[in-house]
Each structure stands twice: as structure tokens, then as C-alpha cells.
Image (cartoon, rainbow, N blue to C red):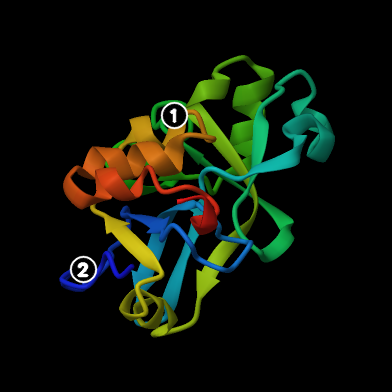
Amino acid sequence: MDYFATDKLIAPERGDLLISEPYLPDPNFERTVILLCEHDENGSFGFVLNKKAQTSLPDLVEEAEGFDSEVFVGGPVQQNTLHFLHHTPATLKGDKEIVDGVYWGIDFEGLLSAINTHQLEKDRVKFFIGYSGWSPGQLMEELEAKSWIVYKKATPELVFNRNPDELWQEALKSMGGKYRVISNYPTDPRLN
């Protein structure tokens, strides 16, 4: 079923969400929602918001002992790296704002200090191992192939406060119309 047949191509921008189409065959991105942190002539990158890793922050960073925050698989690229998003600009200064109220963390030492002095709440930060990346032009090719649905401008609520197991469906539902219908597609199309 070509549910995108009449869609115009929506060019993504930093701060948008990329929602995988229901039957994307790549297991790295099956039913994922990605916050796009950069998109320009040099390529694109972002973090998968709804794919939990099998570890927690203290397992990866000894200095974060007691801050039992979940960690997510940000994507298949460089899974030996740790990244974070937050919405605490007063506590963590100098980080890059991706969209209103959502910041890409740069100062890891400042983050650890905020954790150890109890200035940071777990629900205001999200950690990722690895990231999702596209070479110049690659993401646009995938959009033309109808692999992704662009959700214009993420909100802190979507990035931080949603149940990750329901984020894909909730993001589509919030778009309304045919996307609400798509949100109910079964994981296995043979069950339809």
C-alpha cells in the first residue's frame, strides 16, 4: 500500500523528527523516531529516541553512580561514544540548542558535576550510545524513497517525557489524518 503516494517531499531541518515508515526493512531503524540534530550540505545526524540500550548510565560512567538513567541506542554509528540531550539550560550552559527547549550536550564534565551535586533530574536528560548519520544527500534520497516521515519541530515533551515504547505510535497519531491510521499498522503486515 502506497500511503505516501500524494505526499509532497518535506525537507527536514534541525529539530525535526524523522519517523520511520511502518515497514522499513532496516532493523536498526524499525519503528524508530529520530531527533535530527544537524542537516546541511555536509550531511545529517541525529539520535534514535525510542530504542533502549541494555545498559544504564552508571554501567558506562563510573562517576555517575547512583544516577540510574536509561541509555538509548542513538544509532548504528560509533556505538563506542556517549552523547546526551537535555532541557536544563540554566544548569548546563554552553550546549547547542537543537529546537526550543532541547539541547545537545557538549560539556560532559559539567554534566557529571550537575549529577554529583544533585542539580540535574533524570527526566531532564537523555543518554545515547552511538548516533544515526547520513552522508551528504543520503537522507534526501531516503526521503524520496519514502523511508521516513518528517514531523516538523520536536518538543521537549516528545523528546523527554514520552514512553519510548509508544513514541513511534504517539508521534504519528499527533500528526492526525492518514498518519493516525498508519500509527495503527501492525508490526507484521501479514497480520493486517
Name the residue that disc number 1 marks.
162
Looking at the picture, does residue 123 appear above or below residue 98? above
The disc, 2 or 1, on the residue closer to the chain's N-terminal end is 2
Place of residue 139 in the rendered image (x, y in percent of width and height, measured from the top left): 40, 76
- Indicate left or right for 3 with 47 as reference: left
Q: Nearer the viewer, residue 1 or 75?
A: 1
Place of residue 5 in the rendered image (x, y in percent of width and height, measured from the top left): 21, 73
Q: CA distance from mark 2 to mark 1?
A: 25 Å
Determine which quarter of the picture holds residue 4: bottom left
Amino acid carrying label 2: it is Ile
Residue depicted at 46% across the width and 26% down the height: 91
Q: Nearer the viewer, residue 57 or 159?
A: 159
Mark number, residue 94? none
Q: Secondary structure at mark 2?
A: loop
Determine which quarter of the picture holds residue 9: bottom left
Looking at the picture, does residue 62 appear above or below residue 150? above
Determine contact: label 2, label 1, CB under 8 Å: no
Q: Nearer the viewer, residue 177 or 158?
A: 177
- Indicate left or right for 81 with 154 as reference: right
For the question of whether residue 94 can be seen, the reply is no
Q: Secondary structure at mark 1?
A: loop
Name the residue that disc number 2 marks.
10
Residue depicted at 65% across the width and 27% down the height: 113
- Quadrant location, the N terminus: bottom left
Circle 2 packing at 10 Å, graded few (<14), some (14-19), many (20+), is: few
Place of residue 100 in the rendered image (x, y in percent of width and height, measured from the top left): 27, 40
Residue depicted at 61% across the width and 14% down the height: 118
